[in-house]
Image (cartoon, rainbow, N blue to C red):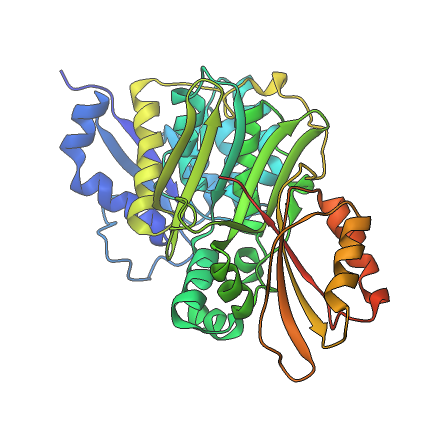
Amino acid sequence: MRQTPVRLGIAGLGTVGIGVVKIVQRHADLLAARSGRPIEITAVCARDRSKNRDADLSGYAWEEDAVALARRDDVDVFVELMGGHEGAAKNALEAAIASGKDVVTANKALLAHHGQALALAAEEAGRVIRFEAAVAGGIPVIKTLTEGLAGNALRRVMGVMNGSCNYILTRMESAGLSYETVFEEARALGYLEADPNLDVGGIDAAHKLSLLASIAFGTQVSFDTVELEGIGRISIDDIRRAGDMGYKIKLLGVAQMTGRGLEQRMTPCLVPAESPLGQLQGGTNMVVLEGDSVGQIVLRGAGAGEGPTASAVMGDVMDIARGTRLPTFGTPATQLAAPTAARANAPAPFYLRLELFDKPGALAKVATVLGDAGVSISRMRQYGHEDTTAPVLIVTHKTTRDAIDHAIARLPATGVVDGDPVAIRIEEV
C-alpha cells in the first residue's frame, strides 16, 4: 500500500531551489525508502516563469505569488528559498503557518530578525520551522545542536560562517594581493551578494551566529546585540605579519554565555595557524561547538552552493516526513528568555600593529603606556624602517578589550606612533 506522500511547495527557484528540485527528481526512490513516504513537488513559485532553469518544471503547478503557494491545499510543506527578511518571504511564511503548513527555509536574515515571533506562531499552530540550510550550507550544525548535543550544556559556539570572507582572506594570503584587489576578484566571480556588505561587513555571518546562539543557550534570537566588524580594514601587511607570529586572520563568530550575559561577536580574529580554523581555506565553513560533556566538536564543509544547501533543505524535509517534530530553536519558544547582552570582554591575548617613528625611546614609551593600562607584552617583533617609521608587532598576554582600547587612546600623546594602531583579538581554539 502506497504511503501518503509529503507534498512540497517551493517558493524561489534560484540556485538552491533548483538544487532541491533536482534532488527530488533524481532520488525519488531513495527518499521514499529513507523517509517511509514519497516526497513530491506539487507547486512552485518564482518571479520569471520563462527563465531557463536547467530543470524540468512542467509537472508542477505554477503560482505567481508566494502567499498563494503557501495557502494551496495540495502543499504540506512550504519550502521558502526566496531570501529577504521583510516583504514576500515573511508574508508567505506567515501564511503557510496560518494555513497549517510546516516550513523549511534557508532564510537566515528572516529568522535573525523575526525568529521569535515566527517560532511562537508555528508552535502555537502545531507546526514546525526547520532551517538547517540557513546556517553553514551543507554542514548539519542545527541538527547537531538540537539533537546530537541535546544532553550538553554548551560553553561556546565558534566558527567561520561566511565562505566569501574566508575566500578573500586566504586568497590575499596565498597570492600576496591587497584586500581591494581580491574584493573585486570575488565580485567578478559571483562570490559576493548584490550588497557586498552583507558578506564583507559580517552581517550574513552574524545572522547565522545569532541563530546558533539561540539554540545553544536557550535564548531568544538577538541579532541586534551581535558585536559586528567586517574585514575591510584587514591589510595584506596584517596577514603577512600575523603569519610571521604563527597566526591566521579569520572573520570569526563567537557566542558564549557569561556571568554578565550573552556575548556574541562576529569580528576579525587571529587563530593559531596550526589549528583547524587556521588551516581552513577558500570558501569552506567551519563551526566549533563546545559542550560540557562532549568537549569540542569540529564541523567542516561547504558553506554555500546548489548541492550543499539543497542537501540541507532536503534533510529538513526528510525529518518532517519521518515525523520528527522539534521546537524551532530546540527549546519551546515560550521558554526562550530575552538575553542580557554583554560586550565581549573576556580576557584574551591581542595582536597589536604599530608604526613607530624612528625616535630614541619610542618602544619604551609604548611599553609604558601599555603597562599603565595593565597590558603586558608577551612577544614583540620590529621590522626594517620604512622612511621615517618602522612597523612593530606586539602579542600581549591575556588582557581585556577595555584595557587595549584604554592604551590605544593614549598612544597618540606619546608622539612616537604614526597613524592608527591595529588591534585584533587572538582567539584560543
**Who is closer to the viewer here, 66 or 340?**
340
Residue 242 relative to residue 301: left or right? right
Above or below — where is 408 with respect to 72?
A: below
| Residue 90 seen anywhere in this rendered image of the structure | no
Residue 250 relative to residue 351: left or right? left
Q: Count up the numbered dots.
A: 0
Above or below — where is 144 with respect to 266?
A: above
Residue 35 relative to residue 283: left or right? left
Above or below — where is 150 with respect to 15?
A: above
What residue is drawn where x is 29% and y is 43%? Answer: 20
| Residue 396 seen anywhere in this rendered image of the structure | yes
What residue is drawn where x is 61% and y is 64%? Answer: 233
**Who is closer to the viewer here, 292 or 368?**
368
Above or below — where is 389 with respect to 375?
A: below
x, y percent for residue 139: 36, 39
x, y percent for residue 79: 40, 38
What residue is drawn where x is 49% and y is 21%? Answer: 330
x, y percent for residue 170: 42, 61
Asked which quadrant contains residue 188, the reply is bottom left
Quarter of the picture containing the N terminus is top left
x, y percent for residue 31: 20, 30
Work out which residue is located at the far bottom of the displayed protein and give it. Answer: 387
Residue 252 relative to residue 170: left or right? right
